[in-house]
Image: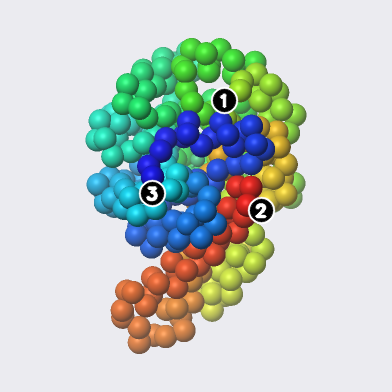
Amino acid sequence: MLVNLTKILPAARRGNYAICAFNINNMEIAQGVVNAAVKLNRPVVLQTSQGAIEYAGMEYLAAFGHIAAETHQKLPIVLHLDHGTDEVLVERTIKSGWYSSVMIDASRNPFSKNISITRRIVALAHARGMSVEAELGPILGIEDQVRVSRAEAAFTDPAQVKKFVAETKCDALAVSVGTAHGPVKYAPGEKPSLDFKRIAAIAAATKIPLVLHGASSVPHDVILELHEQCSRLGDCARVHDAVGVPEAQIKKAIGFGISKINIDTDVRIAFTAAVRKTLLNDSQLIDPRKILGPARDAVEKLVERKIRLFSGVK
Ligand code: G3H
Ligand code: 13P
Ligand code: ZN
């Protein structure tokens, strides 16, 4: 069943668990995510970045969400636009009628401009029964279209939260509290750590669910699999630098009011390691189903692990 964020996040915040949100870029990733959520019978967010829409097309990505929601009527599934920085695209997403939720990311604007842009998008989305996630404090990281340099990144100021939420009426708030997008979240020698004091102060300022972006952990076993395959190619440089947020710290953050956990990088690593392994093991392989099938299974395994850890699976 297709739902918006307000149907699942407030209960998560009250219950001290989180809903996992995964970026989908193609059919295999979408199916891997949905298979795991169905297996564990836990709600899930399928989210598409602007880059994913540019790559696959909004209609195709939305179709994956709709087919999943129609097939699994009892399972709450959210189809969400991730990091909508382009207001025209956010409006198009809202007016398409395909999505149940959008994120407006105006976090790089001055505070008052962030409020006015977010408020306008919230009004448009709420009129159509859709939820809106907003962002306060740009989160570090260089991805395809989500690019915030160290100089631009800024932690969320708890003193701004109450006014921001009251004036925008957003349904969920992405906060900048020590994570970054992509595989390299911390500089060499820097200790991976979340700012729990800041999370607690933000949570004290608002009751709305808080969202942790850049929440990939780059788990040891998952990155090891990629190392193994990359070393067969003799090139591991960027992979060796990967440092994520420890899973124990994410669990602790959930107790402090974080209710939505955004994961893309870990899915990418699991997917890529599986594709590399398959191709390196058999140079004769030309059937896309045999190449991408194991990657879909690897995504399912990774997503199952995340949902078990963070989504209150008994
Ligand atoms: O938050 C960023 C996501 O990882 C999306 O990255 O723009 O490369 O699809 P992307
Ligand atoms: P990661 O790069 O840590 O997976 O974060 C993804 C994200 O925040 C998507 O919005
Ligand atoms: Zn993000």
Q: In the displayed structure, does residue 37 sit left or right of residue 123?
A: right
Alpha carbon distance from label 2 to label 1 = 25 Å
Amino acid marked by disc 1? Ile
Name which of mark 2 and mark 1 comes first in the sequence.
1
User: From the viewer's perspective, is residue 5 above or below residue 36?
Assistant: above
Name the residue: 45% across, 44% down. 76
Q: Residues within 10 Å of mark 3 (few under 14, many from 20)?
A: few
Q: Quadrant of residue 25?
A: bottom left
Rendered-image quadrant of the N terminus: top left
Name the residue: 60% across, 64% down. 223
Q: In the displayed structure, does residue 16 sit left or right of residue 300?
A: right
Q: Position of residue 207 (x, y in %)?
A: 61, 23
Amino acid marked by disc 3? Gln
Q: Which mark is residue 314?
A: 2
Q: Quadrant of residue 132?
A: top left
Alpha carbon distance from label 3 to label 2 = 22 Å
Q: Position of residue 280 (x, y in %)?
A: 46, 81
Q: Residues within 10 Å of mark 1 (few under 14, many from 20)?
A: many
Q: Position of residue 204 (x, y in %)?
A: 69, 21
Count of labels in the image: 3
Label 1: which residue?
208
Alpha carbon distance from label 1 to label 3 = 27 Å
Amino acid marked by disc 2? Lys
For the residue labelled by badge 1, is the local secondary structure a helix, a strand or a loop? loop
Label 3: which residue?
73
Name which of mark 3 and mark 2 comes first in the sequence.
3
Relative to the observer, which residue lies in front, 130 or 120? 130
User: From the viewer's perspective, is residue 183 above or below residue 221?
Assistant: above
